[in-house]
Image (cartoon, rainbow, N blue to C red):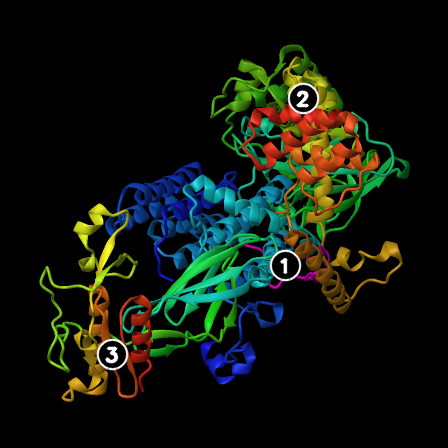
């Protein structure tokens, strides 16, 4: 059919597309979302006020402008973000030229796919529920463009009211079948093709580059990084150092990871077994390779990973989907081997250009006083920090060419990055091998789910120095100035009076519950895979299911679920419930029957009234008014305002 | 599809004619994906494969929901037709060349509204909604070309409700036929006046003798009303003439030997219509019958149908 679309149909399409693009708001650049909506507005404007289609020239102009905007915002339209953004823009451009029912349908089918694309970016429960809602709206729009729809519906509102309940009902009816398919549809144990390569860029989080001042963006980031469930007791706050990238190289402004370390695997540790904590970590997709076990992991399983000789733990592939990893960490340990010459060289190296002369001179002075006594030097630095320095999340900016000098001798305000980098610099100047370690510190206990929740805002940086015979020793210079940072968390240490929403009052409880819900969602839905599918029925005593077993189960249970849904959705919902008067009347007749008046279904109220009066002549007048009132209201021209009185009188009759 | 139906008529009860009423039960409703349905299926397939490959469970959940909604909707597509029945077919007779307005009455008895129904006959189609527990009349206009009995033939009742991804249809082949009158000759010559006996005139001068007065009947031509006398009476009065047989207009098949059969029929048809509109009494002489003299709608309808049914 080539009938062109009515304004209502265009309105339905535009509404569905707007809801669809909202599903992408968390990653789509705001300018693209805005131009998407602007294009819909143009199309609606044309459908309402202008005859005929949007002119070709205008369309071409808009297309060029949008594509230029796209390239400037997300780069070339390839890969995950570029491709998805292109798809979304093309949908809006398609709507601009949509005239026929066929166009509208193609557009809607493509919208289903585009809605699904949102799961490449977020798999959270809210995103999923919203996408399912968008799916229902898209179905409603599809219903809206079928032939014969909306005969005699005057406006867009009426069209929505007509289309949405139907698709909502069908969506609810489809739930049983959906769940059966989800549970039993055989999953692939290995992917057919690889994940999109750029899936590992673009997330904020800890990286192997630390420029004092750069991490501060993380303080405001409450997104979870991981949740840890401990087999035994929880670690004490002083033990909750989650070890991430180790930074060796200082180029004058920033600390960087050491590339050559990446190939040295294995740690030589001595640890006492009773101090080992066993726990499993549910890692959120960080799109990085670093894992963050407690300092320091001795065993790990659940993922293909490797441990580097400086104590970093790396997944072989970037964590692009949630991973469950089991760790054992020793909280008391000793590096057993000698410090390799390469490590010593790296751990002592300072920028060649002597950019921070005062800090270097200070270190050399400490060396002169204490020799190689690392403990004494550390004590002196920490006591100076304790005495003169302030912990703040908003420190004054530092001079780019000598940040350490500026921090140590001028501003004296900063947070973990400043303290750890200054400490390591001075230690190196004093001839003691030292390095910066980054990761997370702390975590909030969630009692609903019995786990420790670590967020991006818990990011931290500390230091390690090498003591002969002891190995690497952890020092947290931030703890010297703000011991509460270790016990309470970053923001509380900086702003003791600040209230974090997730820790206080009912909102905090709610937040904790929400986090628990999303962790259950993670376990039940996101983590479901081929392995768990096969073992699904094991608790009921079944052997692991084979693919054919799954297929049979899907066929049988799916058919039953489909039948259930069809039966429910076809239930006759149009049968009228008796109205107020009808209900009161029914009860009144029941009461008459109980008093001994035989009531037959085929008898009209007039005749019934005669019989009732002859049975109870003493109440004839009362019965007469009731029957007359009912007849007038139901069959005649009784006044509607007499209804409540009559209903009451009917109820009162005994 | 149409090809397959023509080759294998038994497949979808394509041919058999039935008596009314025709109830649409499940066994005579057929369902297939539309072209758009195939495209939609491809999209769902792509969603499924993508979700499976990346083990992206929310995406799979979404894809399964879309697929499940589609599957539930198939039943609603069939359910949209099932339980309807075609109660009656009516049509006013028309002259060949003007479209026949066929009025079909569908009965909904299951208390469900049936939306998005399309009734189709050859190229004519009508979209309608059948209201719950009610009779719905659908009119469809069919072009007519030939005089005589007209069989509407197979009607197709179909729907794409609710989403347009599948369509369900059922053939209705009611055993009914409708009379189509012969085409009236355009610009036919005027009515023959006393063509046979060549006496008697159509027009009467005022003051001419009449047999008497009687009460007005609906079929009386206005020119016979006796206005003066009626003004004094309670009702309209009509002049009644002593109307000799020879006085009636005679529409004679044999009066135009130079014309072929069809032209004669259409000229006679045009004359009958003209006589009817002028309220004249006339006689119609056909090769094997003779009608009249007579006048009025009923008489004209008889004449017209005999003309339509001439071999």
Q: Residue at (61%, 68%) from the top-left corner?
A: B25
Q: Name the residue carrying label 3.
A: B284
* Left or right, B1 with reference to A368: left
Give the CA separation, mark 2 to mark 1.
Answer: 47 Å
Which residue is at the front of the view, B142 or A496? B142
Q: Which chain carries label 1?
A: B
Rendered view: A207 above or below B215: above
Q: Which chain carries label 2?
A: A
Which residue is at the front of the view, B1 or B245? B245
Q: Give the class, few, some or many, for how many residues have Cα within 10 Å of label 3's Cα (few <14, many ≥20).
A: many
Q: Is residue A468 visible?
A: no
Same chain, marks 2 and 1?
no
Q: Name the residue carrying label 1.
A: B52
Query: SS of the residue at dot 3?
Result: strand
- What is the x, y in percent for residue A134? 54, 45
Which residue is at the front of the view, A465 or A30? A30
Q: Give the class, few, some or many, for how many residues have Cα within 10 Å of label 1's Cα (few <14, many ≥20).
A: many
Q: Quadrant of residue A1?
A: bottom left
Closer to us: mark 2 or mark 1? 1
Q: What stretch is highlighted in magenta?
A: A180-196
Query: SS of the residue at dot 1?
Result: helix
* Left or right, A272 with reference to A490: right
Q: Name the residue carrying label 2.
A: A478
Whether the magenta-drawn stretch holds residue A178 is answered as no
Rendered view: A238 above or below B182: above
């Amino acid at each position: 059919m080539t009938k062109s679309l009515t304004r209502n149909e265009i309105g339905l399409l535009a509404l569905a597309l707007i809801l669809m693009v909202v599903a992408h708001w968390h990653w789509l650049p705001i300018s693209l979302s805005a131009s998407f909506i602007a294009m819909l507005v143009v199309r609606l404007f044309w459908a309402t006020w202008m005859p005929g289609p949007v002119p070709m020239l205008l369309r071409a102009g808009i297309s060029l402008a949008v594509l230029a905007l796209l390239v400037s915002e997300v780069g070339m339209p390839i890969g995950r973000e570029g491709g998805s953004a292109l798809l979304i823009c093309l949908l809006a451009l398609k709507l601009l030229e949509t005239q026929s029912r066929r166009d509208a349908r193609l557009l809607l089918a493509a919208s289903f796919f585009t809605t699904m694309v949102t799961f490449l970016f977020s798999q959270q429960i809210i995103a999923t529920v919203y996408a399912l809602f968008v799916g229902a709206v898209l179905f409603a729009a599809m219903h809206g463009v079928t032939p014969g729809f909306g005969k005699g519906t005057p406006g867009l509102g009426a069209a929505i009211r007509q289309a949405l309940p139907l698709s909502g009902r069908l969506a609810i009816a489809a739930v049983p079948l959906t769940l059966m398919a989800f549970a039993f549809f055989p999953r692939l144990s290995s992917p057919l093709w690889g994940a999109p390569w750029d899936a590992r860029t673009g997330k904020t989080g800890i990286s192997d580059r630390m420029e004092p001042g750069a991490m501060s963006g993380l303080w405001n980031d409450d997104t979870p990084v991981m949740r840890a469930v401990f087999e035994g007791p929880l670690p004490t706050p002083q033990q909750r150092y989650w070890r991430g990238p180790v930074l060796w190289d200082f180029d004058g402004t920033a600390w960087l990871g050491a590339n050559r370390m990446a190939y040295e695997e294995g740690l030589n540790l001595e640890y006492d077994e009773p101090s080992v904590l066993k726990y499993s970590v549910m890692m959120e997709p960080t799109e990085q390779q670093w894992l963050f076990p407690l300092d320091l992991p001795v065993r790990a399983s659940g993922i293909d990973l490797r441990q580097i000789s400086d104590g970093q733990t790396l997944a072989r592939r970037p964590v692009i989907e949630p991973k469950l990893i089991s760790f054992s960490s020793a909280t008391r340990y000793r590096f057993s081997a000698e410090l390799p010459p390469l490590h010593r060289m790296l751990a002592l190296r300072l920028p060649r250009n002597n950019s921070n002369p005062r800090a270097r001179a200070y270190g050399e002075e400490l060396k002169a006083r204490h020799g190689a006594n690392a403990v004494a030097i550390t004590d002196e630095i920490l006591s100076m920090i304790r005495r003169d320095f302030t912990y703040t999340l908003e420190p004054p900016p530092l001079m780019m060419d000598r940040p350490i000098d500026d921090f140590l001798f001028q501003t004296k305000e900063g947070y973990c990055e400043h303290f750890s980098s200054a400490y390591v610099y001075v230690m190196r100047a004093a001839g003691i091998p030292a390095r910066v370690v980054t990761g997370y510190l702390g975590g909030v206990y969630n009692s609903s789910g019995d786990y420790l929740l670590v967020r991006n805002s818990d990011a931290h940086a500390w230091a390690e120095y090498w003591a002969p015979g002891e190995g690497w020793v952890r020092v947290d210079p931030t703890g010297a100035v703000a011991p509460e940072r270790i016990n309470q968390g970053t923001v509380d240490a900086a702003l003791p009076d600040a209230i974090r929403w997730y820790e206080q009052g009912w909102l905090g409880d709610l937040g904790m519950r929400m986090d628990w819900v999303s962790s259950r969602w993670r376990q039940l839905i996101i983590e479901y895979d081929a392995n768990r599918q096969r073992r699904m029925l094991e608790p009921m005593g079944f052997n692991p299911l084979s693919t054919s077993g799954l297929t049979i189960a899907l066929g049988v249970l799916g058919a039953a679920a489909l039948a259930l849904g069809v039966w429910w959705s076809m239930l006759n919902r149009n049968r009228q419930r008796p109205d107020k008067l009808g209900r009161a009347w029914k009860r009144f007749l029941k009461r008459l029957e109980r008093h001994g008046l035989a009531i037959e279904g085929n008898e009209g109220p007039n005749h019934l009234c005669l019989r009732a009066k002859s049975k109870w002549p003493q109440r004839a007048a009362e019965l007469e008014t009731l029957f007359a009132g009912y007849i007038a209201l139901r069959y005649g021209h009784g006044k509607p305002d007499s209804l409540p009185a009559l209903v009451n009188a009917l109820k009162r009759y005994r | 599809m149409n090809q397959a139906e023509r080759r294998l008529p038994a497949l979808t009860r394509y041919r058999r004619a039935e008596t009314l009423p025709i109830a649409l039960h499940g066994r005579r409703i057929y369902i297939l994906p539309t072209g758009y349905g195939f495209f939609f299926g491809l999209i769902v397939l792509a969603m499924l494969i993508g979700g499976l490959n990346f083990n992206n469970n929310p995406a799979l959940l979404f894809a399964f929901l879309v697929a499940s909604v589609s599957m539930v909707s198939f039943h609603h597509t069939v359910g949209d037709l099932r339980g309807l029945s075609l109660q009656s077919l009516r049509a006013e007779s028309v002259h060949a060349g003007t479209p026949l307005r066929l009025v079909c009455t569908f009965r909904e008895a299951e208390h469900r509204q049936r939306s998005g129904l399309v009734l189709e006959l050859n190229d004519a189609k009508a979209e309608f909604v059948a209201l719950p527990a009610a009779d719905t009349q659908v009119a469809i206009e069919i072009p007519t070309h030939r005089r005589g009995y007209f069989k509407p033939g197979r009607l197709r009742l179909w729907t794409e409700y609710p989403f347009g991804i599948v369509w369900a249809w059922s053939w209705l082949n009611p055993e009914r036929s409708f009379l189509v009158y012969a085409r009236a000759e355009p610009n036919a010559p005027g009515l023959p006046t006393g063509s046979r006996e060549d006496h008697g005139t159509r027009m009467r001068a005022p003051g001419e003798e009449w047999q008497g007065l009687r009460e007005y009947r609906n079929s009386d031509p206005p020119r016979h009303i006796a206005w003066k006398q009626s003004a004094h009476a309670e009702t309209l009065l009509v002049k009644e003439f002593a109307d000799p047989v020879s006085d009636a207009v005679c529409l004679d098949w044999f009066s135009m030997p130079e014309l072929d059969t069809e032209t004669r029929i259409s000229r006679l048809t045009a004359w009958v219509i003209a006589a009817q509109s002028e309220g004249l009494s006339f006689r119609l002489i056909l090769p094997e019958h003779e009608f009249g003299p007579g006048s009025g709608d009923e008489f004209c309808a008889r004449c017209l149908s005999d003309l339509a049914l001439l071999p």
